[in-house]
Image (cartoon, grey):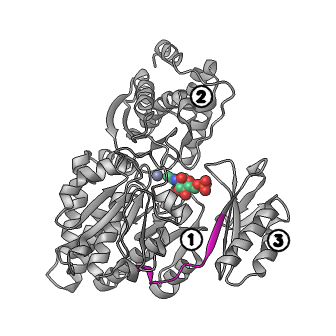
Amino acid sequence: MDLDALTKHAAFYAKPDGLILQYGTAGFRTKAEHLDHVMFRMGLLAVLRSKQTKSTIGVMVTASHNPEEDNGVKLVDPLGEMLAPSWEEHATCLANSEDQNLQSVLMDISEKVAVNLHQDAFVVIGRDTRPSSEKLSQSVIDGVTVLGGQVHDYGLLTTPQLHYMVYCRNTSGQYGEATTEGYYKKLSKAFVELTGQAFCSGDDHRKLKVDCANGIGALKLGEMKPYFSQGLSVQLFNDGSGGKLNYYCGADFVKTHQKPPQGIEMKSNERCCSFDGDADRIVYYYQDVDGHFHLLDGDKIATLISSFLKELVLEIGESLNIGVVQTAYANGSSTRYLEEVVKVPVYCTKTGVKHLHHKAQEFDIGVYFEANGHGTVLFSKAAETKIKQLAKELEDKKSKAAKMLENVIDLFNQATGDAISDMLVIEAVLALKGLTIQQWDALYTDLPNRQLKVKVADRQVISTTDAERQAVKPPGLQEAINDLVKKYKLSRAFVRPSGTEDIVRVYAEADSQESADSLAYEVSLAVF
Ligand code: 16G
Ligand code: ZN
């Protein structure tokens, strides 16, 4: 390690006085102007992680659905997964160390994790379309190179594309080719083959309007469109030409406000969807003939996909176990529908993709979606092998179903939730089952619900258990919530400290909107 060079370069990336940041569920995230030193340091950390794992590590510069002025960074582990939790602590430690301690903190981490400093390091970098992202990604590159690591800068990418690249590179190309073209071809081939047999009633069936949140999704979906155009025609809105990132648009806006984004022309009953700012989340929606807005969120997506997968598994007659993973935010109706109608076991984890992803890996087929539209489906190696083998056998109903599953495996991003990939899966399922968005929506009715934010002096006074569904601290809070919940029918409520904002979140659902609103309000009073 060339410590002189490190000291020299580090001088360009002074840490603002008193700034303390935490590597949370979404990495580091704050105002872009405060992140230069963090980026440089994450370049350093990525080199250590790469040396330790003897693998390519990814660094993504994005703040997802946050306002355009923000930015953020997260590291991607060898199999395209989120950074291991023990390394989140190292990241926090490194980001917060005073400038003069940088070297010693870095050495401490190397020792703790037993890094062989002579090992080669390789880091790949991607960034979203924020005005600050290019400069910040240069700071990451500087951090990597000063420690002697090699870099490949992919430039503009969606977050899930970077996860895909890392996964491809660490599996010797077996998962796919580590280029955007490789990604487009792999997914489009699977989509076109999957939808090949679908009966399409009219051209309208193949049309989809996509709100791209004025983000990277517009660019990448635009590049990809020609590859799958024989199966689906997408029309892009909020494509970044003039509009501001995530401003009155995007998946987070639509889910939070339960209304259509600005900048999209919606005719009644037309199928529309929204990506978030880095294209790892998706929600669907439509407006009915009476002008009512209908949102089909991550829970509806999980339900549609789980039913489809369950049918295919029954058809191939193999005992592949399916598990669905949700969080406390999943609408009670979706959980009931999955358990009672689709008849699949449902599990609840803490909020944050890494928790759901981890749980989903326990099954042959693990479906996970957060209500906010982040999710994917994971297939175990054993399931994949079995499915591929069945798909090769004689032409019959069984092998047809296996072939479909084979394409489904290729179509889902196995590294992380991916708006483009999820969109293609949903479009394929709707086409194959001949479902309109209204029929999909009608599978079950959401219980009315309300989310509130509560500002408190210290959100850490609240701690939770049971996948965030029960408050253990402060004393008496859970008892108070229990008493309030008893007052309403079909009700449920919980509170949890946010992992991304300095607030406490309250969620309530009940048999009517008035009850859900009033329960949420009463619970928020109990939080003080
Ligand atoms: C992050 C998480 C998202 C989660 C959200 C919750 C990832 C990649 N993103 O954006 O999954 O839903 O945080 O935010 O894990 P909250 O803690 O503020 O409610
Ligand atoms: Zn995102």
**As drawn, which residue projects farthest toward the left?**
394
Q: Is residue 385 visible?
A: no
The quarter of the picture where residue 350 lies is bottom right
Q: Point out which mark residue 330 bears.
A: 1
Image height of 249 relative to 232, above or below: above
Instruction: Give the mark nearer the N terminus: 1 vs 3.
Output: 1
The magenta-colored residue range is 440-451
Find residue 95 and report its horizontal and vertical position in percent.
Answer: 59, 32
Image height of 142 relative to 124, above or below: above
Nearest to viewer (mark 2 / mark 1): 1
Q: Residue at x 50, y 15 (%)?
A: 3
**As drawn, which residue projects farthest toward the bottom?**
341
Dot 1 and dot 3 residues touching (CB under 8 Å) = no
Q: Residue at x 79, y 47 (%)?
A: 457
Image height of 251 relative to 12, above or below: below
**Residue ID for mark 2:** 108
How many angstroms separate mark 2 from mark 1 (CA)? 41 Å
Disc 3 Cβ-to-ligand 1 distance below 8 Å: no
Q: Which is nearer the eye, 83 or 209?
A: 209
Find residue 90 and report its horizontal and vertical position in percent.
Answer: 58, 37
The quarter of the picture where residue 225 lies is bottom left
Q: Point out which mark residue 119 bears.
A: none
Instruction: Give the mark nearer the N terminus: 3 vs 2.
Output: 2
Number of marks in the image? Answer: 3
Give the amino acid type for the residue marked by disc 1 in the picture: Ala
Secondary element type, mark 1? loop
Find residue 407 and report its horizontal and vertical position in percent.
Answer: 25, 68
Q: Point out which mark residue 479 bears.
A: 3
**As drawn, which residue projects farthest toward the front?**
290
Secondary element type, mark 3? helix
